[in-house]
């Protein structure tokens, strides 16, 4: 079996391929099966060696990763195929998101966050410590008695006002229509913001892209009023959809709302400039709401302004590149654009769980109502502690330092994984993710689920690509995921984490090149 229970079954024993054996066990459709070897293994099975039947081997090997994918997303079955009874039948089985699943697999092999040898390149959060050249952050907190009360469900008015000022200053200069505090709803985290928005939607189709953020799968499947509808790229691993294609697909299918991450998770690509303006125009003209997940809007590495560290002006006239759909809204209370952002990524404070939704006033009122029964609102003392982080001068200086630091990590990691034979078709211009192509690795290491299982044995965490192939409620019939040979690496953690990761990856890949593993042997049950 691919999945073991942890350290008792460490690295898989291999045999070296001889000259007359096939080293490449996968063809374009899946693993090649050696009939003679299967017959030999079945003879061994009669002598007490545990091995899958010929039929099982052939069927599972030709669609190995998809079988694992279905196991993960559906109730597990025993060897006879009978469904195991649920322990608590009044509950339904809640699947994990990709990051949580990958981390859970790593914990089986001894991972914990303070372990110095592990490379956690699966995490969806940035490093949180001080950055060189960044302004200091005072996180000392004294809580007066009145802040032990609930905060308003829509958030503290002072924080809502500062968020409005931030968007007006960066993206609404010279425009008549401006955001106010009434256009802002403070929420306890980004996923809470997405969930509130889903809860407030009526009976409508909601379009989404593949690949995209793994948690969309659960969010889009929560409420029965919502009918999820995939807007598919012609090529699953295409970076972006043109405005013309978006207008054709969204308009032709009659979706009422579209949910997307921009910059995109996991590809690190960005809809911006004229293309983003067209997306907003299409939403306005077709009365289609676009929910813009803009959590990585400060992580850009291709700006044209000059960094103060390189001689650029260190004042309000010189801002680093950031992108928001707020730039192209005509009327803040009429255009159907909903922006979700917060302190989690751009301000590197994920533990605060302080985020916001910017939208027309009537939508903000509905979001506050949804929050009253979903989450009750964000933490009052931490909202107060967040106020200095929303000062414009702090944001400008902190964003310069962030881009400078993360660009160095991106450039290092891209260079190293390409050296190891891992391809990157779309070099990330934003976020802190790399959408990596495993197809050049020795099979079956080029299967993202197999890759994760081997990675955790070498103290590496990544997220298999299949989790970004969003499939809410299992409505799409996926015979074989187009994201099967991709993984998402994160360069969000500190640089030493990446150095460890590259070293461990090189050890893993070299071991497989030296002793390639046949699919049939890989599927055999391992003995302790």
Image: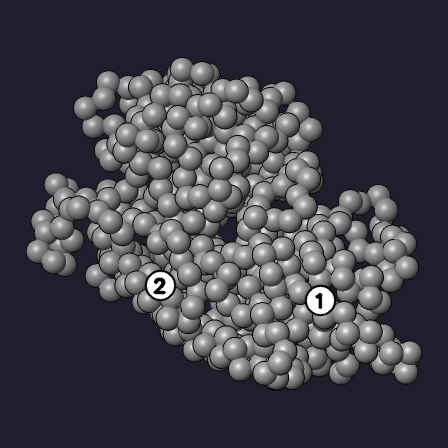
Residue 85 falls left or right of residue 377: right
Above or below, 285 relative to 431: above
| Residue 262 spot, x, y in % from top left | 40, 40
Relative to 280, 365 lies left or right: right
Element type at mark 1: loop
As rendered, which of 188 and 123 lies closer to the eye?
A: 123
Viewport quadrant of the C terminus:
bottom right
Q: In the image, is residue 267 above or below residue 417? A: above
Percent across and percent down for residue 201 are 58, 24
Mark 1 and 2 residues: CB-CB less than 8 Å, in contact?
Answer: no
Among the 4 quarters of the image, the one containing residue 277: top left
**Residue 525 in view, yes or no:** no
Residue indicated by mark 1: 33
Write the residue at 13% across / 54% down.
308
Residue at image coords 40%, 67%: 417
Classed neighbour count for the residue bearing mark 2: other residues with Cα under 10 Å, few (<14), some (14–19), many (≥20): some
Task: Count numbered badges in the picture.
Answer: 2
Q: What residue is shown at x 12% (from left), y 41% (from top)?
A: 317
Left or right of 16, for residue 409: left
Figure quadrant of the N terminus: bottom right
Give percent across and percent down for residue 282. Answer: 40, 21
Rate crowding at label 1 as few (under 14), some (14 to 19) or many (20 or more) other CA atoms within 10 Å: some
Q: Label for residue 414?
A: 2
Q: Image check: 83 left or right of 396? A: right
Sequence-wise, the earlier of marks 1 and 2 is 1
Measured from the top left, where is residue 67 in percent x and y?
A: 72, 55
Q: Is residue 474 above or below residue 79?
A: above
Closer to us: 119 or 422: 422
Most extreme residue toward the front is 20
Where disc 2 sits, the SS reads: helix
């Amino acid at each position: 079996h691919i999945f073991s229970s942890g350290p008792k079954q460490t690295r898989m024993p291999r045999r070296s391929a001889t000259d007359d054996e096939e080293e490449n066990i996968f063809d374009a459709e899946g693993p090649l099966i050696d009939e003679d070897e299967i017959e030999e293994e079945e003879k061994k099975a009669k002598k007490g060696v545990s091995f899958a039947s010929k039929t099982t081997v052939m069927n599972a090997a030709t669609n190995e990763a998809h079988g694992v994918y279905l196991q993960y997303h559906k109730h597990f079955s025993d060897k006879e195929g009978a469904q195991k009874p649920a322990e608590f039948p009044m509950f339904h089985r809640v699947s994990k998101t990709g990051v949580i699943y990958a981390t859970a697999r790593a914990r089986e092999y001894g991972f914990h966050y303070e372990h110095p040898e592990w490379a956690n390149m699966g995490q969806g959060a940035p490093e949180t410590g001080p950055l060189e050249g960044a302004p200091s952050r005072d996180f000392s907190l004294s809580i007066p008695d009145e802040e032990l009360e609930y905060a308003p469900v829509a958030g503290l008015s002072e924080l809502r006002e500062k968020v409005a000022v931030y968007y007006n200053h960066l993206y609404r200069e010279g425009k008549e229509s401006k955001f106010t505090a009434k256009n802002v709803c403070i929420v306890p985290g980004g996923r809470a913001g997405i969930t509130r928005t889903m809860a407030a939607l009526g009976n409508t189709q909601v379009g989404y892209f593949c690949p995209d953020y793994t948690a969309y799968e659960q969010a889009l499947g929560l409420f029965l009023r919502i009918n999820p509808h995939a807007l598919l790229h012609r090529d699953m691993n295409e970076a972006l959809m043109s405005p013309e294609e978006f207008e054709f697909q969204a308009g032709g299918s009659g979706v009422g709302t579209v949910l997307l991450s921009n910059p995109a998770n996991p590809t690190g690509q960005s809809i911006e400039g004229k293309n983003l303006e067209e997306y907003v125009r299409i939403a306005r003209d077709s009365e289609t709401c676009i929910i813009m997940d803009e959590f990585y809007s400060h992580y850009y590495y291709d700006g044209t302004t000059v960094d103060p560290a390189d001689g650029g002006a260190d004042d309000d006239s010189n801002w680093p590149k950031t992108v928001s759909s707020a730039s192209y809204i005509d009327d803040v209370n009429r255009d159907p654009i909903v922006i979700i952002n917060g302190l989690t990524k751009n301000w590197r404070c994920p533990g605060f769980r302080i985020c916001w939704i910017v939208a027309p006033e009537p939508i903000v009122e509905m979001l506050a109502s949804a929050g009253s029964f979903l989450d009750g609102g964000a933490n009052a003392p931490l909202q107060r502690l967040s106020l200095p982080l929303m000062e414009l001068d702090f944001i400008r200086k902190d964003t310069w330092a962030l881009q400078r630091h993360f660009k160095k990590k991106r450039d290092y990691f891209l260079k190293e994984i390409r050296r190891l034979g891992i391809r990157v078709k779309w070099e990330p211009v934003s976020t802190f993710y790399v959408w990596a192509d495993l197809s050049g690795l020795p099979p079956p290491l080029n299967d993202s689920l197999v890759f994760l299982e081997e990675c955790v044995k070498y103290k590496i965490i990544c997220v298999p690509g299949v989790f970004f192939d969003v499939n809410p409620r299992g409505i799409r019939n996926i015979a074989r995921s187009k994201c099967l040979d991709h993984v998402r690496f994160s360069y969000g953690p500190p640089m030493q984490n990446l150095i460890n990761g590259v070293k461990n990856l090189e050890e893993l890949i070299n071991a497989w090149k030296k002793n390639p593993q046949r699919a049939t042997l890989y599927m055999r049950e391992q003995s302790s």
